[in-house]
Image (spheres, rainbow, N blue to C red):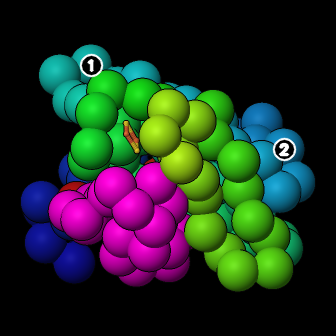
Amino acid sequence: MTETSLMAADIALCRMDEVPEDGALRVELEGRPPLAVFRVGGRFHVTDDTCTHGEASLAEGEIDVEEGIVECPWHAGAFELATGKPCGAPCTVALRVHAFEERDGRLFLKE
Ligand code: FES
């Protein structure tokens, strides 16, 4: 493991139990755009929190658990949580998806 990856793995996002099942938590880290941690069907996803169409917080969006997507609270655009791919107009730009790891009941950003 490189020094960089060791440092990156130590960027704590949140405790896993802070993220509601089939819900989301907005996480603000100093010097970075806000992130959204989603927990859907027992799986976690970490994305940028701000919609690529406007300034809406996707952590406040509607989650479709069956489809694994989040619908933006402003104009009902949508993104796949696993890939960030836009899947509902008016969104056309992909949402950034972040790598993370689960350790000791917490989530850590890996980048
Ligand atoms: S701000 Fe998200 S769809 Fe417009």
Q: What's the residue at 50%, 32% (across, down)?
A: 74
- Residue 88 image position (x, y, % from top left): 46, 67
Q: Nearer the viewer, residue 99 or 65?
A: 65
Q: Nearer the viewer, mark 1 or mark 2?
A: 2
Q: Nearer the viewer, residue 46 or 72?
A: 72
* Number of marks in the rendered image: 2
- Residue 106 image position (x, y, % from top left): 65, 50
Report which quarter residue 95 is drawn in: bottom left
Q: Nearer the viewer, residue 8 or 92?
A: 92
Q: Residues within 10 Å of mark 1 (few under 14, many from 20)?
A: few
The C terminus lies in quadrant:
bottom left
The three-letter amino acid code for the residue at tag 1 is Glu
Name the quadrant where ligand 1 sits: top left
In magenta stretch: residue 70: no
Relative horizontal placement of residue 24, taking residue 89 as reference (left or right): right
The three-letter amino acid code for the residue at tag 2 is Pro
The residue that mark 2 highlights is 20
Q: Residues within 10 Å of mark 2 (few under 14, many from 20)?
A: some
Q: Nearer the viewer, residue 10 or 15?
A: 15
Let me know if residue 14 appears in the view: no
Report which quarter residue 54 is drawn in: top left
Is the residue 16 above or below the residue 101 in the image? above
Q: Which mark is residue 30?
A: 1
Q: What's the residue at 26%, 47% (across, down)?
A: 52
Secondary structure of the residue carrying tag 1 is loop
Q: What's the residue at 21%, 30% (across, down)?
A: 32
Relative horizontal placement of residue 9, taking residue 81 as reference (left or right): left
- Residue 2 image position (x, y, % from top left): 13, 72
Specify the segment rendered in magenta.
77-98
